[in-house]
Amino acid sequence: MENRETILRSKEFLFSVKGEFLEFCKNEIVKLKGSLLDNEDPNESAKIIYEFFASENESDLMPFKKNFLSLKRKGVDLGILFLNLALFLQKEYLNHIKNAGYEFEEEAIKFIVFLENKVKIIESFFINSKGNYKEALIKERKKAESILDIFKNIQENRQSVKLLNFYRGVPIESEAFVLECDDELVVLRTSHLQEIVMKINGKVFVQKGDFFPQTVKADVELVNFMNNSVTIKNPRYYFSSRLQKSVKELKIEPKFPLSVKAGKNLAIFNGWILNISLKELTLMSEEDICEKEEEIFIKLSFEESGEVTEIVARVEDKYFKNGYYYYFLVISSPQNDERIGSFIKRRTKEAIFELEEELKHYIA
């Protein structure tokens, strides 16, 4: 039962980082090959590898064997690929269980064993793999040390970096200067608005640019409003094109979930929209509404007047956790774009106002 619970909890976590995992996996495949894989789409391979990690049957390689063999024939070292993916998931999960309040050491060990079993399956079948879990961990540690060296260089040259956080889906960006940097911690000075959202999020992104070749993600250790400083720790490179997509295509999280009517044909269901952009939305329902690739209509009101808008959307993905969660692609139309765009603008102003009000509790 314990192993079953570990697998289910792992699946829930994997789904929560699916977008970031797919992006990282695709980049790793291309990197290990050195170029695009001829007629093979790395995005499809990344999806299959995700399904392998999410599979409840740890020992069943058959559904994925054909794709893995194809990658190997095209020069991708599967041992290195799966080690890098396991390390990526391990780092993300350790941060996840800190925030979720689980028993840290116990849960960390369970998940690492889960990942090791997945890697061992690959290594036992593809005997030419060159992977080594311990060596890979050492490599990751050296990478983290190099990030701290870059922060020290930024401090010495009195340069700045650009920080990024999200509040209810609204991107908050500010310039930051490095005040101190040692072997574990970095102290930054930035805007008060950035400080309050960093305190709320418990993390921050340092955007790639002149100094960092890739976006850096770090945990927030301490926010000191009195001396206008923020201490961060555990910096690591963060590989995801979805981050910049989230900046460009605002996906707003309403303060309270939007109650909607959704359905197909003659069946109508109740649901709640958790976030929405011009192109995507996430809907939660207590009922099993539809399957992947199906199109449904969603009726909701963006206006205080109660005027109803009907959106047509296609199911991109779904999962169950105390309810059914659906990820939709919105079918665009001029009327919907205008109403959704207006709603996003209002909610953006509302989110900024909330941050400014919260800030007043810390700064006179």
Image (cartoon, helix red, strand yellow):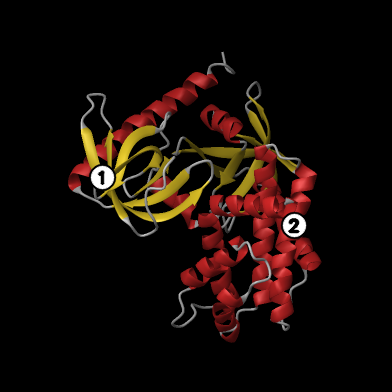
Residue that extends furthest to the bottom in the rendered view of this protein: 73
Where is residue 130, by image quadrant? bottom right
Percent of width and height locating residue 39 = 43, 82
Classed neighbour count for the residue bearing mark 1: other residues with Cα under 10 Å, few (<14), some (14–19), many (≥20):
some
Point 60% across, 31% down: residue: 199
Q: Amino acid at mark 2?
A: Ile
Which circle marks residue 281 in the picture?
A: none
Which residue corresponds to mark 1?
311
Where is residue 142, by image quadrant? bottom right
Q: Is residue 204 left or right of residue 221?
A: left
CA gap, disc 2 and disc 1 = 42 Å
Residue that extends furthest to the top in the rendered view of this protein: 364
Q: Amino acid at mark 1?
A: Ile
Which circle marks residue 112 in the picture?
A: 2
Q: Is residue 353 left or right of residue 55?
A: left
Residue 131 visible in image: yes
